[in-house]
Structures are given as structure tokens and as C-alpha cells.
Image (cartoon, helix red, strand yellow):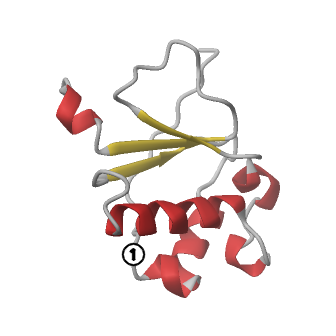
């Protein structure tokens, strides 16, 4: 299924690396300072006093709410973690995030294969 440019502009990609050089301008990209899902492996990120991913999700929600950013339909979070458990627990137990985001299906891709 092909995604057209207006649909793609409602997608946000968050990843623990800088925006790739050849990244299409219409695809929104948010760099993260670290792969905290990999580091946390099964622990809830909301238990940490400061979580860059949780902060990025909060900022994105507020920016969309105040119309500083266009609407968002899906957020993809790139990680080397083998399980989404940390993100699921964070979305369940961090009150602000739990009321605004829900976890959906995810796709695992091994770039070397």
C-alpha cells in the first residue's frame, strides 16, 4: 500500500540517531538522544525522573494541541530493543501519556537481512 505525501506528513518517526541525509522532507523525524527502550529492556520509562522519549511524546502532543505542529496519526519509535514492553508499560502508567497515546501493532525489521 502506497502512502501519499499528505498521509505521510501525519506520521512521526522518533529514533536514537540524527535525521538521515536522504530523508524525505515531508516525513517528520524527531531524533532521540539515546535508545532508552534498549537500555531499559522491560522497565517502565516513567519510573525515571527524566525520559527523553516520554519528554518528546509530551512536547509533540502539546505542539499539536497548540497548532505549532500539524496533526499526528501515527508515531513510529525506532529501537534495537527486542520487546516493546518498556514503551507499553510507560504508555500505561505515565498518566499524561496514558491518556493521550495508545500502543498499536509494531513492525520489526532487521536492516542487515
Which residue is at a point 63% across and 66% down the rendered structure image? Answer: 55
Name the quadrant of the C terminus. top right
**Is residue 103 at all visible to an observer of this figure?**
no
Q: Quadrant of residue 44?
A: bottom right
For disc 1, the neighbor class at 10 Å (few under 14, some 14 to 19, many from 20) is: few
| x and y, in percent, of residue 85 in the image | 61, 64
Q: Is residue 105 above or below residue 2?
A: below
| x and y, in percent, of residue 86 in the image | 65, 65
Q: Is residue 94 above or below residue 6?
A: below
**Is residue 20 at all visible to an observer of this figure?**
yes
Which residue is at a point 76% across and 59% down the rendered structure image? Answer: 41
Residue topped by disc 1: 100
Which residue is at a point 58% across and 59% down the rendered structure image? Answer: 56
Q: Quadrant of residue 45?
A: bottom right
Which residue is at a point 50% across and 82% down the rendered structure image? Answer: 96
| x and y, in percent, of residue 102 in the image | 39, 69
| x and y, in percent, of residue 4 in the image | 18, 26
Asked if residue 84 lies left or right of residue 27, the reply is: right
Q: Is residue 1 above or below residue 81?
A: above
Q: Nearer the viewer, residue 8 or 108?
A: 8
* SS state under label 1: loop
Asked if residue 39 lies left or right of residue 11, the reply is: right
Q: Nearer the viewer, residue 12 or 35?
A: 12
Q: Tally the marks.
A: 1
Asked if residue 63 lies left or right of residue 20, the reply is: left
Name the quadrant of the N terminus. top left
Amino acid at each position: 500500500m502506497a502512502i501519499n505525501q499528505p498521509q505521510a506528513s501525519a506520521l512521526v518517526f522518533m529514533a536514537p540517531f540524527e535525521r538521515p541525509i536522504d530523508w524525505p522532507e515531508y516525513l517528520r523525524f524527531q531524533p532521540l538522544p539515546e535508545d532508552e527502550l534498549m537500555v531499559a529492556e522491560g522497565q517502565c520509562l516513567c519510573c525515571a525522573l527524566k525520559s527523553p522519549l516520554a519528554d518528546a511524546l509530551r512536547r509533540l502532543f502539546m505542539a499539536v494541541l497548540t497548532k505549532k505542529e500539524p496533526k499526528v496519526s501515527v508515531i513510529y519509535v525506532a529501537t534495537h530493543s527486542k520487546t516493546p514492553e518498556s514503551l507499553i508499560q510507560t504508555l500505561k502508567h505515565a498518566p499524561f501519556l496514558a491518556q493521550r497515546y495508545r500502543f498499536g501493532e509494531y513492525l520489526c525489521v532487521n536492516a542487515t537481512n
